[in-house]
Amino acid sequence: MPNSEPAGPRPARRWRSRLLTGALALYFLLGIAFLVLRYAVLPDIERWRAPIARQAEIALGVPVSIAAIEADWSGLRPRLHLKNVVLRDAEGESALVLPQIDATLAWTSILKLRPYFHRLEVQTPELHIARDAQGGFSVAGLPVAAAAGGDGEALRWLMAQRQIVVRGATVIWRDALRQAPPLRLNEVNFRLVKGFGTHALGLTMQPEGPLAESIDMRADLRQFDEQAPTAWTGRLYAAVRRASLESLHAWVDMPAGLTGFGDTRVWLSLQAGQPVAATADLALRDARARLGEDLPELVLDQVAGRLGAQKSATETVLTSRGLSLDAGDGIAIAPTDLRISRKGDGAGQVTRVEVNQLDLAALSALGAHLPFDEAVRSRLAALAPTGRFSQVQLQWTGEAAAPSAWQVSADFDGVGMRARDNLPGLGGIRGHLAGNQGSGRYTLDSESMTLDLPAVFEAPLGFDTLFAEGGWQRRDGALRVTLDRARFANADAQGEASGYYAPSVDGPGVIDLQARLSEADGTAVWRYMPKVVNQDTRVWLRDSITAGRAHDVRLRLQGDLADFPFREGGGIFLITGRISRAKLDYAKAWPAIEAIEGGLRFEGARMEITANQGRIYGVRLGKVRVVLPDLDVPDEVLTITGVATGGTQDFLRFVGDSPVRARIDGFTDDMRAEGDGMLDLKLVMPLRHVADTEVTGRYRFKDNALTLVPGLAPIADAAGQVNFTANALSIPQASGTLFGKPLQLTATTLADRGVRFEARGEAQMAALQAAYAWPALAHLSGETPWSAQVVVRGREAEVVVEAPLSGVSSSLPAPFNKSATEAWPLRAAFKVQPGAPVSLEAKLADRASLQLTIPRDEGAPLRGGLGIGAPVPAGERGVRIAIAQPHVDVDAWRAVSSMSSEAGGALPIERVVLDTPRLTVAGTDLHAVRAEARQDKDRWRVKLRAKEAAGEIDWQQGGEGAVHARFSHLLLKKGEAEAEGAADLEPLESLPALDVVIERFGLRDLELGRLEVTAFNRGGLWHLNQLKLASADGVLTGSGQWWPQAPARTELDFSLDSTDTGALLKRLGHAEAVQGGSAKLAGKVAWQGAPTDLNVATMKGMLTLNAENGQFRKLEPGVGRLLGVLSLQSLPRRITLDFRDVFSEGFAFDSISGSIDVDQGVLRTDSLEIRGPSAKVFMRGSANVKNETQDLNVNVQPTLSESVAVGAALGAVNPVAGVVTYLVQKALKDPVEKAFAFEYHVTGTWSDPVVTRIEAAPPEGGAGSK
């Protein structure tokens, strides 16, 4: 069966035939056009230059000229290259010159019979755009019709092009309307691409100057309407890098003072030419803005984040995402997400705010800079909110300052605000709240929070921890804040509370509060007193309760606070509790009550504190009551009563630490007491005039020991009563024992507010000695009556003490020795005045007078004088002493003073003058003495004139001291005191440096010659540099050193040279001991003790003796006993051989030589040899100097050999034999003398020696052998 195509509808076949025919016609038409252009038009394009210019004029509406034209192909599209295209204004002047235009024609130009371009590219044009003063725009001087309200034909033509490109353009913008400087935009690149129903635009440029680094603008537009070319729908984008907000002010309307730098990206959505949504990314820094004429400048270090806005017919929404800012003044907002929406308008407008977090302090600080409503800004400033809200949802209806309805839900942490109107002040609050204008709930769970209720409490209350639940309700316009339950703790207390508070517009409000404190700090009670308690009472509680703990404190406060403290009923105010270890500083300048155990009670207007026990210092208190009858009267009067028992010293301290001290001028400050007493005390104290406090007190004491004045012996067995008020003190009668005898004491306050004390009694010297370690008191005995009067006026005091001293004997050295039957009246008076030195005057009969001026200022000199048998001299820089007595025994007074070297500080003596016929010092008497000593700082200068002495002494104190002395003569003779046996003096501990020269020095009636001594201290040693005693008969020189540290030791090297030994010994008191001769004695010795104490018993050393050509004379017994040992005058009396002619009448010697060892005072020799014309003597053995004994072996060899030999020669017949005999005995070492030598052993004392002859042994190889 053959295939056959069904026959379609005939009209369809006709339309297909027509379309095919039209397409073939169009194809051939375009082909013809292409061929025409390819071979006819484009090769001869120059001929078409003018027609092309005319078409451009039609399109642009302005005259156009083209300097040159070229053509080629871009694919299948013809392309024109135009050179120097000029657009002219109405006057025919060149308005715009385009150096190069490359235009690729679109084939649609044939259909529309107008030039349309597939691509139109303009190279490096310079375009001048301007706005005149009337707001009209022009491009290259040519008015823009659209801007002036034209039909926009040029814009429609441009938007119809497929692609327009501008490269490397320069645009210069002039704005006469803003009077702005020209703005030059370089490297302007523009691209317009037309799609199917869309337009895509791109524009980049680089502004010249600081305006911005670059600008990038783009657009994606849809729904282009040729009849309304500006009614676009689409999306715009702009990005500006490193924009300078300050530079933009010249060309763009911006808030005044807005400056800064940053990057900005903006997206704008358009609907029918109207913006419906906007988004902006900001990254600004160093921004400054003043958002209102009356607002302060806002300084932002940086701003970053995204802002958004949306607008519809029913709602406006503003958003932020990650918006943060950091202001230079410390304001910083963390990245924040915010949504604000508004619906409706007028009174029904609903505003809703949602924010993820909100820093109230930063917002409050920014509020001063932001264009808020003045009411909002004022409220922010007044509340000064702090802390952070999170998950906030807030909605209100109407104006924000006075909403008709509101609701809120938020979490908060660290939130605080000042108290304002009826709102409490908060700080450090953490919790959650949710509610509306009618009711709500809150939960608090906070640490380190504060609560400020200015209508209730004087100061904010702080809590370390607080947990509370409650809410609020508003009924009939009245607000009630409830506290369902609360637990709290802080440094002051811990406890729990519940109740409610209803603030009132015309009063402090109504409260119903119950609280219990398990434990509380008593010093903080004042903080929790309601504000309606009088200010003076709260201040007293604050200043008075300075320590203590309160336990089980319960508070009930109920009623209208306007009626507090509910004197007439209608409310309850009750605080009860127990107190322990409390301290009540009840009045300024009065001693506080400590260790209080008792209770407190505030009820209505009355306050009462009771203490079962307590103490003031060491005084125990009992039955103490502190009562304030009315807390809120204009003149609150506090009454304190109590009884105390304790130590009298604590009572004195109580008086000294109270205002009574000022009234009695602090005379009890230095009093000391041992013993107890009882105090009754009552104080009536106006809290607003504490200085007018009335005081009544009575102190009774018994069996006390009282010391009225430092240094005075205590009054024993003291008993009496002291009455006092704030203005006066009296002692009606007090008794006791002083210095071993009873005394009576009274005290009264004088009319001029002075206080007079009178005391009288007797004093035993033995009791005085027990009380005071004064050396002089040891020389007093007996007893004497005495009386004293002390008058104190303000800071002035006068004291007078009198005693006859009858019944007292004294063994002190003259002139202060007396018998008990003598009466020597003693009167001492001193006066104390503020700002002036203390004056002291004392007189002891007619024997001595003392006047002293004692300075108060440290470093000021004490001045005065002491006269002993002489008028009192006036001291200028210290104390002057004048002494005129028949006999002054310095040694006796030194013995008295040496009994105590620590009896007290010495007077600062300036000058001492001494006149006495006889002065005993160091066992020596000086007569007709006139001495004057002056002290200059640490130096004494002494001038001495006496019969036995004349010279000057300069004594430098400090360290070991130094003495410089020059005497014309110093002849020390044995005094009466030495003859009677002077008292031993203290061992020396040091010696000063010495530089002493005495032209005539004598000792014990012996004139020894000229004495020179120099010595110095160094390294703990006293060095005797030079000792020289010179006379016509001999010179003694020496040097040595002394170790003062125990055991003290002295070393001495000396040499004694004499040219006339007999005369020297005569000078030393040994007359006729030796006749003539010369001698030298040298040695080095040492002994224990000082250089001034020649301790022979401990002496050690070595002596050498050499003497020549002298003769021992017959010595008297007891004189020169040691010389008697050498002279051998005792031998003739003790031996049978007659040597009288040799020794008894004086032994002549040619030489004496030998060395002597000294050991512990014993002289020992093995080689002492005496040679004389009559005999030779050899001595060995020892002599004890201390005991004056001896143990010697003496070998005496008479000088016989020469005389026998010579006699034989002269008297014999044969003289030759005599000569031979003499020569032989010399050759044999004097065998004849040795043959006649005698040996003796001498023992016993020097004054009564025992001499024993020692039989000689037979000579070895003698006559018997022959």
Image (cartoon, rainbow, N blue to C red):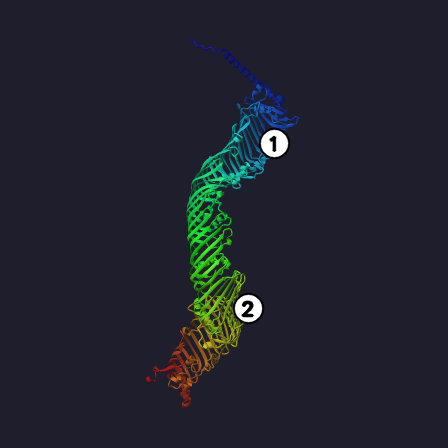
Q: Say if 587 sits above or below 807 in the image.
A: above
Above or below, comparing residue 527 to residue 682 in the picture = above
Mark 1 vs mark 2: give the one in front.
2
Residue lying furthest top: 1
Label annotation for residue 173:
1
User: In the image, what residue type sits under mark 1?
Assistant: Trp
| 305 and 582: which is toward the camera | 582
Of all residues shown, which one is farthest toward the front? 568
Left or right for 718, reference 262 = left
State the image coordinates of residue 11 (x, y, percent, origin top left). 50, 11
- Camera-side residue of 813 and 920: 813
Dot 1 alpha-carbon crowd within 10 angstroms: few under 14, some 14 to 19, many 20 or more:
some
As shown in the figure, which amino acid type bears the numbered disc 2?
Answer: Ala
The quarter of the picture where residue 242 lies is top right
Q: CA distance from mark 1 to mark 2?
A: 108 Å
Helix, strand or loop at disc 1?
strand
Q: Residue furthest left?
A: 1265
Q: Secondary structure at mark 2?
A: loop
Q: Residue furthest right?
A: 91
Q: How many marks?
A: 2
- In the rendered image, residue 415, in percent from the top left (x then y), is placed at 47, 40
The answer to whether residue 407 of the structure is visible from this angle is yes
Camera sees residue 898? no
The crowding category of the residue bearing disc 2, from other C-alpha atoms within 10 Å (few below 14, some 14 to 19, many at least 20), is some
Rendering quarter of residue 71: top right
> Which image quarter holds the N terminus?
top left
Give how far across and how far down residue 788 sits, in percent.
49, 66
Q: Residue at x 51, y 13 (%)?
A: 15
The foreground one among 291 and 9 is 291
Q: On the image, numbered disc 2 is attached to which residue?
A: 874
Residue 880 pos. (x, y %): 53, 69
- Of callouts 1 and 2, the N-terminal one: 1
